[in-house]
Amino acid sequence: MYSLLSTFYLLEFLGMIRDRLISLFDRNRTSVWFEKLTGIDRYRWGNIRTGKARLSDAEIEAVVELFPQYALWLVTGNIAPECGQVSPEYEEANLKLDGQEAGSR
C-alpha cells in the first residue's frame, strides 16, 4: 500500500522527468513537430508543457523512441557517454569541442 509520502516522491520524480522532457522543446522542436513524429496530439504536448496535464508513460516512451541517446538522462538525470547515453547539454558541448582545432581559442 502506497503512503502519502510515496505518492509525493513519485509525483516529484515525474516532475523532474517532465522538466527534462520539456527542455527538449525549442524554436524548431515545437508541439507540432512532436505531434508529427510521435503521433501524440499537439494540444496534449502543449498541456504537458504548461502543466495542465500530467506526463504519462506514453509521452516518455515516445520521446525515448525519438531520442534513444537521452533515455538515461530523461529518467534519471544522469549520463553515461561511454554507453552512448548523453544529455542535450552534453551533446552541445561535445559539438563545440569537436569544432575546435588545436591551438584555437
Image: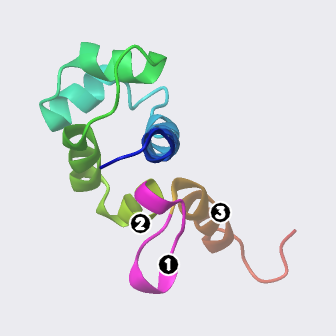
Residue receiving disc 2? 72
Q: Residue drawn at (21%, 45%), measured in percent from left and top?
A: 62
| Residue type for callout 3 | Ala
Give x and y (percent) for residue 17.
45, 45
The residue drawn where x is 45% and y is 38% is 18
Give the residue pinned by disc 3.
93
- Which corner quadrant of the image does residue 96 belong to? bottom right
Q: Residue at x 42, y 29 (%)?
A: 28
Q: Where residue 51 sits: x, y (%)?
A: 45, 19
- Disc on res. 6: none
Of circles 3 and 1, which is in front? 1
Answer left or right for 8 relative to 56: right
- Lower sequence index among marks 3 and 2: 2
Callout 2 amino acid: Leu
Residue 104 drawn in magenta:
no
Residue interval drawn in magenta: 75-86
For residue 49, above or below residue 22: above
Answer few, some or many: residues within 10 Å of disc 2's Cα (few below 14, many 20 plus, some between 14 and 19): some
